[in-house]
Image (cartoon, rainbow, N blue to C red):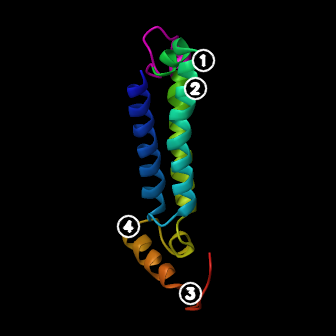
């Protein structure tokens, strides 16, 4: 049961990281790394605690989110809820895009890469002056 907990937590954290960093267009995002590290540590710790307190509840939590015996309304709610969480994680990453990428073009790979290069050098695309953001 603990091995399954570790596997599910690893997949969950890697998927969150992929969504965050892919939508942000950069791996240079310390806040996201802290968030993922916290999730990677707290997931197994809480699971281990739950295993010691109530192993039956942990077994239930490790089951698939959508199950055959669920009512149709519950399944629909879960699908909408998961889609909202995925959209939320993508929106968080898009909010991290450099300002030049957000204001001058649609989020495309070439625009975001060139904006990220400019921002890493410490210069704004419009003013060519140093900035911090």
Label 1 with label 2: CB-CB less than 8 Å:
yes
Residue sitting at x 57%, y 22% = 50
- In the picture, the disc for residue 49 is 2
User: Which residue in the protein does label 3 denote?
Assistant: 126
User: Which residue in the protein does label 4 denote?
Assistant: 109
Q: Secondary structure at mark 2?
A: helix
Residue 109 in magenta stretch: no
The picture places residue 76, in percent across and down from the top left corner, at 52, 22
Q: In terms of depth relative to the viewer, which is nearer, 44 or 19?
A: 44
Name of the residue lying farthest toward the top: 69
Q: Dot 1: within a 10 Å radius of its alpha carbon, few (fewer than 14), some, or many (20 or more) residues?
A: few
Disc 1 to disc 2, how far (Cα)? 6 Å
Q: Which residues are magenta?
A: 63-75
Q: Earlier in the sequence, mark 2 or mark 4?
A: 2
Q: Earlier in the sequence, mark 1 or mark 3?
A: 1
The picture places residue 65, in percent across and down from the top left corner, at 47, 22
Q: Earlier in the sequence, mark 2 or mark 3?
A: 2
The picture places residue 99, in percent across and down from the top left corner, at 57, 73
User: Which residue in the protein does label 1 denote?
Assistant: 53
Q: Secondary structure at mark 3?
A: loop
């Amino acid at each position: 049961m603990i091995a399954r907990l570790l596997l599910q937590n690893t997949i969950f954290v890697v998927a969150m990281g992929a969504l965050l960093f892919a939508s942000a267009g950069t791996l240079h995002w310390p806040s996201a790394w802290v968030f993922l590290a916290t999730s990677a540590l707290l997931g197994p710790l809480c699971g281990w605690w739950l295993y010691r307190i109530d192993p039956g509840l942990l077994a239930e939590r490790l089951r698939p989110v959508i199950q055959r015996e669920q009512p149709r309304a519950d399944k629909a709610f879960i699908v909408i809820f998961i889609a909202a969480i995925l959209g939320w994680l993508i929106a968080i990453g898009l909010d991290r895009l450099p300002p030049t990428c957000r204001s001058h073009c649609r989020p495309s790979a070439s625009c975001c890469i060139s904006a990220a290069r400019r921002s890493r050098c410490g210069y704004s695309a419009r003013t060519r002056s140093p900035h911090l953001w």
